[in-house]
Image (tube, rainbow, N blue to C red):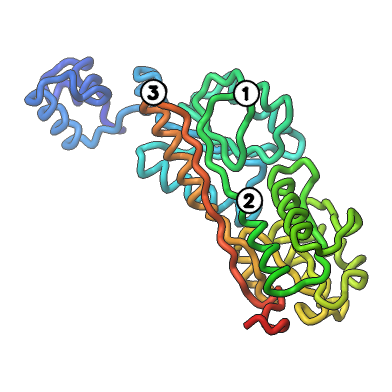
């Protein structure tokens, strides 16, 4: 049976309330008494009840990370970075995501009403009026990942999606000298897709490379969906210096594999590029040219901002933008085009 707080008090010859003060608020007890209590705790191997301690301090020392999904390396890397940072700062991390039968609004409503967590880091892939309304009245401190919410004063960690996609498109146009680019994005309301599609249009327009609405497709970021879609369309995409810009590596990999199944060579017959630089990009054959997103850093920075907010609720809101990096590999055809 584990030792109790009463046993610690008897060993240290102090009251139970003094032991509690040492555990929870060390600075209100004299150094001599604190040392005696801490010695008794060490000798007995006493572990304070975390729930009771949380009730006394009115904090749980737990923070939450809410993601749109938990599947795939993109989200697992965010979780990895967030978890390492939370542990370093003395917090436990609780992970949640919207299930297929939920939406982000209902999930956040649940946290808003009955959460025991001290604060939340929230990644919202699609900002709707309902989500804005919930976060606008949120009582818990929160940090938003990958976007900003209008009407809510909050800390945020974003990726320069527009800059990363521009770098990719300029590489395709200026280095690979593409004549046509097909864009495969997520849902039309997805914030990442909106930014990457904006860069696609801007760069093609700047360089007077023709494109039309028929070159733009909206899927769901999944390998299987992209593979099936590409299987039906890849023969239409083949052409001199034609390229598919998929808005994540999973979809790009699906296109590459569908092309191989159809006898289409990448990049000789059709170049393919992705976004995120997950392990999929390095495992695909040929390896994918992509944009590296600092996923783990984004998770870690979100938790760092959240814990800073918990320590000082009155500090000004902090908006951090992380920079992605263009990673050139074989799938874009830069070498085939004589670009080195």
Residue 246 in the image: state x and y as whole percent: 75, 60
Residue 23 located left or right of residue 77 = left
Q: Which residue is mark 2?
A: 161
Q: Earlier in the sequence, mark 2 or mark 3?
A: 3
From mark 2 to mark 1, how far is it between C-alphas? 22 Å
Label 2 with label 3: CB-CB less than 8 Å: no
Q: Which mark lies nearer to you, 1 or 3? A: 1
The residue at 41%/34% (across/down) is 307
Residue 36 located left or right of residue 239: left
Q: Secondary structure at mark 2?
A: helix
* Residue 90 in the image, given as x and y percentages of width and height: 35, 38
Residue 16 in view here: yes
User: Along the line of sight, which residue is nearer the eye, 292 or 178?
Assistant: 178
Report the front residue among 123 and 83: 123
Q: Quadrant of the C terminus?
A: bottom right
Residue denoted by label 1: 151
Q: Residues within 10 Å of mark 1 (few under 14, many from 20)?
A: few
In x, y percent, where is residue 296?
A: 50, 52
Could you tell me if residue 6 is visible in this image?
no
Q: Nearer the viewer, mark 2 or mark 3?
A: 2
Q: Position of residue 213 (x, y in %)?
A: 89, 53
Q: CA distance from mark 2 to mark 3?
A: 39 Å
* Residues at marks 1 and 3, CA–CA distance in whole angstroms: 31 Å
Q: Residue at x 63, y 50 (%)?
A: 161
Q: What residue does disc 3 label?
A: 54
Foreground of the two, 25 or 222: 222
The crowd level at tag 2 (other Cα within 10 Å; few <14, some 14-19, many 20+) is many
Q: Quadrant of residue 97?
A: top right
Of labels 1 and 3, earlier in sequence is 3
Total residue callouts: 3
Left or right: residue 174 compared with residue 27: right
Q: Secondary structure at mark 3?
A: helix
């Amino acid at each position: 049976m584990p030792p109790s707080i009463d046993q610690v008090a008897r060993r240290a010859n102090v009251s139970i309330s003094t032991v509690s003060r040492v555990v929870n608020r060390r600075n209100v007890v004299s150094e001599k008494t604190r040392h005696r209590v801490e010695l008794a705790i060490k000798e007995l191997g006493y572990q304070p009840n975390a729930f009771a301690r949380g009730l006394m301090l009115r904090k749980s020392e737990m923070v939450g990370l809410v993601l749109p999904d938990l599947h795939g390396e993109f989200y697992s890397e965010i979780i990895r970075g967030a978890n390492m940072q939370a542990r370093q700062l003395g917090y436990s991390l609780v992970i949640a995501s919207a299930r297929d039968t939920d939406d982000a609004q209902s999930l956040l409503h649940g946290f808003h009403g009955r959460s025991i967590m001290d604060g939340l880091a929230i990644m919202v892939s699609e900002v709707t009026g309902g989500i804005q309304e919930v976060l606008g009245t949120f009582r818990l401190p929160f940090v938003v990942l990958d976007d900003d919410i209008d009407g809510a004063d909050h800390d945020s960690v974003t990726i320069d999606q527009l800059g990363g996609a521009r770098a990719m498109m300029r590489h395709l146009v200026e280095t690979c000298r593409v004549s046509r680019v097909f864009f495969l994005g997520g849902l039309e309301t997805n914030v990442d897709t909106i930014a990457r599609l904006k860069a696609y249009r801007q760069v093609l327009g700047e360089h007077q490379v023709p494109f039309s609405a028929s070159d733009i497709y909206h899927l769901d970021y999944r390998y299987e969906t992209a593979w099936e879609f590409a299987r039906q369309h890849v023969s239409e995409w083949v052409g001199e210096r034609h390229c598919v810009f998929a808005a994540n590596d999973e979809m790009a990999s699906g296109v590459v594999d569908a092309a191989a199944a159809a006898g289409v060579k990448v990049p000789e017959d059709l170049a393919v590029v992705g976004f995120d630089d997950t392990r999929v990009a390095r495992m695909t054959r040929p390896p994918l040219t992509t944009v590296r997103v600092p996923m783990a850093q984004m998770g870690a920075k979100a938790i760092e901002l959240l814990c800073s907010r918990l320590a000082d609720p009155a500090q000004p809101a902090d908006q951090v933008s992380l920079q992605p990096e263009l990673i050139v590999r074989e799938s874009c055809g830069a070498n085939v085009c004589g670009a080195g």
